[in-house]
Amino acid sequence: SREHGYTAIAIAHHIDDSIETFFINLLRGTGLRGLTGITRQRGNIIRPLLFAERKEIHEYAVANKITFREDSSNLSKKYLRNKIRLGLIPMVKEISSRFTPIMRGNIYRLTDAQRFIEAGIEKIKTEVLIRGAIDKIIVNKIDKDFPTEFVIYSILSSEYGFKGDTVDELYKSLKAGNSGKKFYGN
């Protein structure tokens, strides 16, 4: 894209890829963001085909004589994604013939919920995060109806790159009343 001055690169991820990513993240452990599948855009990478199923794209390509390439590694059960694609998903489709449209709807709703949470966290940051030589989170300003640990995690991960385990330890230390202990983000 740099060589030709392109502003975006479109890649052919589809809803089936996004569903596989949902299960990969679920099995590895994730928060809500991981359950939203593949994002429509990251930087200059766009994924305009996330609405379509792999089968639909394949049928369209064949009907319109569009050449395509199937990666030979897609058939190997050596990789977790392929185990999900070739094993788990066909089994679930036997139980529910509407699996893909149901999962598409689930992923859309989870994505909307994630966007809503992110907007809420941004608003909360303006109320509880004080920036300076040393940034501070004023914990007692976090609304008591909000999950304090989640709010702290969201701020520390989005602003400073902290990971879950570090935030868990930080929160335990905070609850225990320990002061002076240092925690480092990535």
Image (cartoon, helix red, strand yellow):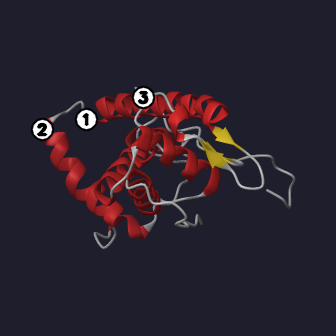
Label 3, secondary structure: give it.
loop
Please state which of residues 73 and 166 is positioned toward the viewer in this rendering: 166
- Pinpoint residue 92: horizontal percent, then vertical percent: 18, 44
Residue under numbered circle 2: 95
- Pinpoint residue 72: horizontal percent, then vertical percent: 41, 69
Q: Quadrant of residue 24?
A: bottom left
Q: Quadrant of residue 19?
A: top left
Quadrant (top left/top right/bottom left/bottom right) for the C terminus: bottom right
Type of the residue with mark 1:
Phe
Q: Which mark is residue 99?
A: 1
Identity of the residue drawn at 32% across and 70% down: 76
As measured in the structure, the alpha-carbon distance from the residue carrying label 2 to the one carrying label 3 is 42 Å
Please state which of residues 165 and 45 is positioned toward the viewer in this rendering: 165
Q: Residues within 10 Å of mark 2 (few under 14, many from 20)?
A: few
Residue under numbered circle 3: 144
Q: Nearer the viewer, mark 3 or mark 1?
A: 3
Q: Is residue 25 left or right of residue 90?
A: right
**Quick check: 15 above or below 69?**
above
As measured in the structure, the alpha-carbon distance from the residue carrying label 2 to the one carrying label 1 is 8 Å
Tell whether label 1 touches label 2 (CB within 8 Å).
yes
Identity of the residue drawn at 39% across and 47% down: 31
**Quick check: 66 above or below 111?**
below
Identity of the residue drawn at 43% across and 53% down: 171
Type of the residue with mark 3:
Lys
